[in-house]
Image (cartoon, rainbow, N blue to C red):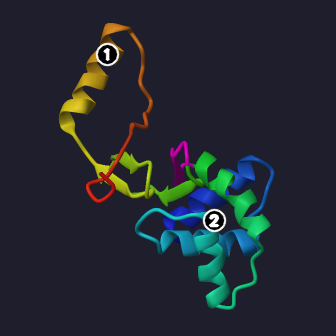
């Protein structure tokens, strides 16, 4: 069994839920995507493969995948919700163009160190963070 499926199965079991065929198909498809996606993207990909999954099931499954730590919602204030699977991926932050919706991923060790320093200064145990910089990409400026 693949790590994502086992993690999801264990998470669902802890909540008194089970891994249904639809949830399993949604998870498998999401794990094939190496970028950001919307609910509609998953729905269309599964439909093209003749896999019967409703959009409602996708909308209901995504919060479970987020809570389990497999998927993360990319904070985009002005746009449709976008997601990405993060299991086994290195932490990164995002820059989001408020005009076209382009998402640029970046990592910066200096930002990470500053956050650690802030946590120490205020005696705060940082368990995670999400940094999103909003603005205009090169094409939209």
Q: Quadrant of the N terminus?
A: bottom right
Classify 130 as above or below 82: above
**What range of the chain is rendered magenta?**
69-78
**Whole-percent x and y of residue 49?**
62, 90
Are the residues flagged by discs 1 and 2 in contact, CB closer than 8 Å? no
Residue at 29% of width from left, 51% of height from top? 141
Work out which residue is located at the far front of the displayed protein and give it. 141
- The stretch drawn in magenta includes residue 74: yes
Q: Residues within 10 Å of mark 1 (few under 14, many from 20)?
A: few
- As drawn, the label of residue 36 is none
Q: Is residue 130 toward the left or the right of residue 18 in the image? A: left
Q: CA distance from mark 1 to mark 2?
A: 36 Å
Q: Residues within 10 Å of mark 2 (few under 14, many from 20)?
A: some
Q: Is residue 18 visible?
A: yes
Residue at 25% of width from left, 23% of height from top? 114
Q: Which residue is mark 2?
A: 39
Residue at 63% of width from left, 65% of height from top? 39
- Place residue 28 in its image quadrant: bottom right
Q: Which residue is mark 1?
A: 118
Q: Is residue 135 toward the left or the right of residue 74 in the image? A: left
């Amino acid at each position: 069994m693949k790590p994502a499926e086992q993690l999801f199965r264990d998470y669902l079991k802890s909540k008194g839920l089970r891994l249904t065929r639809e949830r399993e198909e949604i998870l498998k498809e999401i794990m094939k995507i190496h970028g950001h996606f919307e609910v509609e993207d998953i729905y269309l990909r599964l439909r093209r493969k003749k896999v019967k999954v409703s959009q409602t099931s996708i909308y209901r499954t995504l919060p479970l995948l987020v809570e389990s730590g497999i998927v993360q919602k990319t904070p985009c204030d002005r746009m449709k919700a976008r997601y990405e699977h993060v299991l086994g991926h290195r932490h990164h932050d995002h820059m989001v163009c408020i005009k076209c919706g382009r998402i640029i991923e970046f990592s910066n060790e200096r930002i990470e160190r500053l956050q650690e320093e802030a946590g120490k200064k205020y005696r705060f145990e940082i368990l995670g963070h999400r940094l999103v910089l909003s603005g205009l990409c090169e094409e939209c400026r």
